[in-house]
Image (cartoon, rainbow, N blue to C red):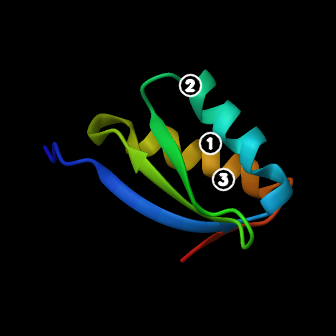
Amino acid sequence: MNLQTLHKEYRVDKTRIGFIKFIFEAYEGVAVLTTLDARTGHVRLAIAPDQTHEAFRIIADLKKDFEFHAL
């Protein structure tokens, strides 16, 4: 079992950063979103070691509605 926090960077719609942060806060303990560059929509997710499946499920759902590209 991997107990390291997974860090993934994404480019998202910059107007949706607050919404994405809110979604991950609602799923307490899954991931924490940090904005790296608000102008370009560059964000980083710190995903809890035992929550990667749930985090990627949330990301897949978010991709249905707006830009969410892995970097």
Under tag 3, what secondary structure?
Answer: helix
> In the shown orientation, is residue 32 left or right of residue 22?
left
Amino acid beneath label 3: Ala
Measuring from the top left, give residue 61's x and y in whole percent.
72, 46
Quarter occupied by residue 52: top left
Q: Do the residues labelled 1 and 2 touch (CB within 8 Å)?
A: yes
Q: Label 1 to label 2, Cα distance in Å?
A: 9 Å
Q: Which mark is residue 27?
A: 2
Q: Is residue 42 above or below residue 3?
A: below
Q: Which of marks 2 and 3 is nearer the N terminus?
A: 2
Q: Which residue lies furthest to the bottom in this view?
A: 71
Find disc 1 in the rendering and name its residue: 58
Q: In this view, does 56 lie above or below 70?
A: above
Measuring from the top left, give residue 46's x and y in whole percent.
40, 48
Amino acid beneath label 2: Tyr
Measuring from the top left, give residue 5's x and y in whole percent.
27, 47
Q: Residue 60 carries which label?
A: 3
Q: Do the residues labelled 3 and 1 touch (CB within 8 Å)?
A: yes
Amino acid beneath label 1: Ile
